[in-house]
Image: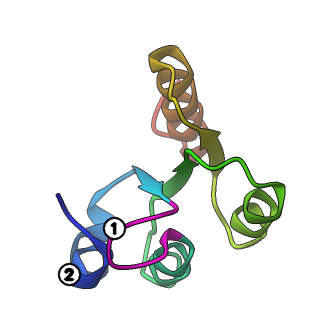
Amino acid sequence: MLCGGTKWYRVWGAAFLCLPLDIRLPDKNGLDILGEMLIIANPPKVIMMTAFQDMETTIEAMKSGAYEYLNKPLNTGEIERTVDRSFRYSGYCA
């Protein structure tokens, strides 16, 4: 499991087209990572997710640049549609 403290996203973030990211991580807040991800060259579309449905956090994530915000438990079809939409939005799929 990769956590926020490893700073892996600073090196590898641009290698991803789409990146699911949890709000609550063991060592860092996902919103903080989102902010750091979006300053790298060619950042991925970040799909925030959480088991804690909080409208304030949802609004903050979207204002901070999240592509989408999903609530857990995650539905496989919903994830596939969201990732597909992010690829089409980025111009990677027809």
Residue type at tag 1: Ala
Q: What residue did someone put label 1 on? A: 14
**Which mark's residue is nearer the viewer, 1 or 2?**
2
Marks 1 and 2 close (CB-CB < 8 Å): no
For disc 2, the neighbor class at 10 Å (few under 14, some 14 to 19, many from 20) is few
Residue type at tag 2: Thr
Q: Residue furthest top?
A: 77
For disc 1, the neighbor class at 10 Å (few under 14, some 14 to 19, many from 20) is some
Residue located 53% across and 76% down the image: 38
Judging depth in this view, the residue of 56 and 32 nearest the camera is 56
Instruction: Say which quarter of the image contains residue 78.
Output: top right
Q: In the rendered image of this protein, does residue 29 appear above or below residue 74? A: below
Q: Quadrant of the N terminus?
A: bottom left
Q: Secondary structure at mark 1?
A: helix
Residue located 43% across and 82% down the image: 40
Residue located 33% across and 70% down the image: 26
SS assignment for the magenta stretch, majority: loop
Q: In the rendered image of this protein, does residue 71 appear above or below residue 14? A: above
Judging depth in this view, the residue of 2 and 86 nearest the camera is 2
Judging depth in this view, the residue of 50 and 65 nearest the camera is 50
Q: Secondary structure at mark 2?
A: helix
Q: In the rendered image of this protein, does residue 12 appear above or below residue 81? A: below
Mark positioned earlier in the residue sequence (1 or 2): 2
Point out residue 88 in the picture as x, y percentages from the top left corner. 57, 34
Q: What residue did someone put label 2 on? A: 6
Instruction: Say which quarter of the image contains residue 28.
Output: bottom left
Q: Which residues are magenta?
A: 23-30
Magenta stretch: residue 28 in it?
A: yes
Judging depth in this view, the residue of 67 and 26 nearest the camera is 26
In the rendered structure, the answer to whether residue 88 lies left or right of residue 8 reads: right
Find the distance from the CA under tag 1 to the CA under tag 2.
16 Å
